[in-house]
Image (cartoon, rainbow, N blue to C red):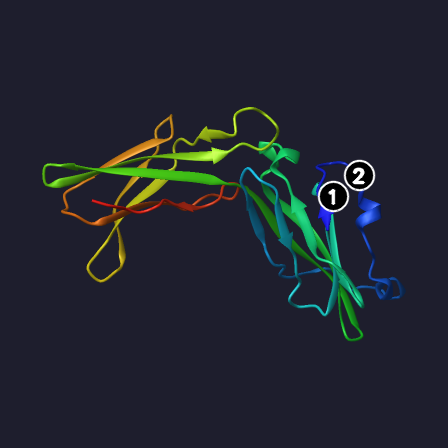
Amino acid sequence: MTTLLRRTVAGLAACAVPLVILLSAQPASAASCTITPSSTTLYQRSKNVTFNVPSAQYWTLSIADINLSVYKVDGKADRIATFSPSRFANADAGAYAVKVQRQNGTAIDSCSASFRLKRGTDLAISVKTVSSSRKVTGTLKRVNFGTGATKWQKLSGQKVRVQYLNGNDVWVTAKTVKTSKTGTFSATVKLSKHRWRATYAGTGTTGARTSSTVTR
């Protein structure tokens, strides 16, 4: 298992195990390939991520910018990396270049991929009856990386979909609203008793989130 140390080079050589057979061959020009997962979303706790390269029998995978190196070679494997939010800054969320060396039988090549690190979100709602309508209010928050005292920050200017469950058990978007400077939002919908929720689609640096449901 590899524990990530942001921009700390000391442990990289120790955790990187080369695919020895590749050293005797000239890899072709790097093509693009798929890795799984292609992203991970961190909240307040550390998270173990198990990587794979579906197109390869054996492989090594590295992300230099976060000192990540995992592998699966003949008879050996270390596919798990531990991501800890305390070891990253908020600005570290985003896309990273991935270098892969892979082998299938006697065929050997290199390829490139992309991996995204995202900050987790929290989305909470409440629903009140206002005459013959329902007023849905809520707050959208995003986790802070690092070791500061403030673990969450309010997320402003983001689109949130307010939805209800119809008679066919299909979620229908009643309104799309934007969060305020304090991360709050509100929508009044002229409907009777239904099951309600809110959804946030996320961004390239911020994870998606669906709230718990409220029936009213």
* Position in image of residue 56 (x %, y %): 70, 68
Q: Residue shown at 72%/38% (left/top)?
A: 5
Mark 1 nearby-residue class (10 Å; few <14, some 14–19, many ≥20)? many
Residue lying farthest to the left in this orientation: 131
Q: Which three-letter amino acid code belongs to the residue tagged 1?
A: Asn
Label of residue 9 in the image: 2
Residue at the (16%, 48%) spot, across then down: 193
- Examine the rendered structure and indicate whether residue 159 appears above or below residue 169: above
Work out whether mark 2 precedes mark 1 in sequence or the reverse, and give the earlier one: 2
Where does residue 113 sit, x and y in percent of width and height?
A: 65, 55
Contact between labelled residues 1 and 2, with CB atoms less than 8 Å apart: yes
Percent of width and height locating residue 171: 28, 55
Q: Nearest the camera: 57 or 135?
A: 135
Q: Residue at x 70, y 37 (%)?
A: 6
Total marks drawn? Answer: 2
Under circle 2, the secondary element is loop
Mark 2 crowd level (few <14, some 14–19, many ≥20, 10 Å Cα)? few
Q: Say which quarter of the image contains residue 216.
A: top left
Q: Which mark is residue 67?
A: 1
* Above-or-below relation of 121 to 180: below
Q: Amino acid at mark 2?
A: Val
